[in-house]
Amino acid sequence: EKGGYEHFMLKEIFEQPRSIADCMRGRINATEGRLMLGGIRNYSGALTNAQRIVIIACGTSWHAGLVAEYLFEDICRIPIEVEYASEFRYRNPVIREGDIVIAISQSGETADTLAAIELAKSKGAIVFGVVNTVGSSISRATHEGAYLHAGPEIGVASTKAFTAQLTVLTMIALSVAQQKGTISDVKFRELLVELESIPKKVAKALESDGKIKEISALFKDVHNFLYLGRGYNFPVALEGALKLKEISYIHAEGYPAAEMKHGPIALIDENMPVVFIATRDSSYDKIVSNIQEVKSRKGKVIAIVTEGDVLIPKMADFTIEVPATHEALMPLVSVIPLQLLSYHIAVMRGSNVDQPRNLAKSVTVE
Ligand code: M6R
């Protein structure tokens, strides 16, 4: 059932070119420039006219929400708030009749997310679900929604559900932006074409597995890791750190790279590995200076870079290449090496990667 892989997690990581394609199947046609997302049809007017959208989720799903925030605000011009379901439900949030809530959940059974949905509904919100498990509690509690179609995810560490969540959220944002007229036809088509090419770029990113395994062997005994990214890659830094913590039990923190100066830089010495997600995008020059700041304090830099980058390999101790894509879609590709890094480190440390200690696949208690 693991399809020849040693663990479900590895199988699920390698399945991503297919699961992302499954997620888009029948929904986009880049050649014709068409996007058809059935699950948001009945309430599409409410989405288009929304004054504000609140995204609620936990863990990895919350990270997917953070990526969506950047894209929705950029192309839909709708203010977005991304909240931990557990905080939202207990803080008397301001929700008005007709506000839109998007709940993201792989399992569809997360207790806090479900309770947050009920609270939002009781205040008159329209709730969309972005859920993997068909027929789950969350899929039933929401007004409408789009399934991930990623197939069952068995490993406790979420991998293919994350990339499918990003894919669905991107399709929702594109569809709203098109209806609102806040995106040009040219940009809409460009993003659609790029989205369609993601499965093959993810497949390319997976080819670095051997190199990532070699790097993992050098870092398996460290006690701390820092993950830094900016813009669309900031949530990816959080996700990389979460993946490492939960399966390898190494302490890891994700930060927006610019925040380093406000505290975490004090941690940097020759024993601190820092993973930079430093692909070519609008914050490239800024992140290059952040890498220099870490190197001048003797930190060990592992950089995720765009194919063909010649500058960062001269500064970083290790570089891992991923194919170029539009910056809004880069998280789909740049997260891949981080999933593999955490997997290999965890295996080398002898942990039970599919069922890490203290964790359950569905968190059905708060
Ligand atoms: O099933 P959900 O997406 O609602 O689960 C949310 C979190 O419990 C989940 O993403 C958790 O953080 C994962 N183990 C992360 O890999």
Image (tube, grey):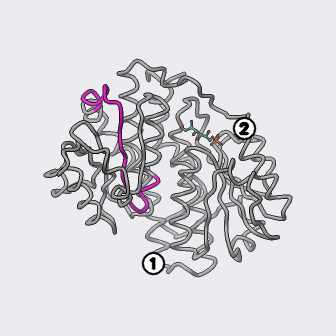
Is 341 above or below relative to 277? above
Q: Nearer the viewer, residue 29 or 127?
A: 127
Disc 1 residue type (three-letter): Val
| Residue visible at 73% across and 56% down in the picture | 91
Disc marking residue 186: 1
Does 166 lie within the magenta span? Answer: no
| Residue visible at 56% across and 80% down in the picture | 182
Q: Position of residue 263 (x, y in %)?
A: 37, 53
Q: Secondary structure at mark 2?
A: loop
User: In this picture, which residue range is highlighted in magenta?
Assistant: 216-235
Looking at the image, residue 164 sits to the left or right of residue 285; the answer is: right
The residue at the far left in this view is: 314
Disc 2 residue type (three-letter): Glu
Q: Which residue matches tag 2?
A: 366
Q: Nearer the viewer, residue 137 or 248?
A: 248
The residue at the far top in this view is: 350
Q: Nearer the viewer, residue 257 or 260?
A: 260
Indicate which disc, 2 or 1, sits on the residue closer to the N terminus. 1
| Residue visible at 46% across and 34% down in the picture | 245
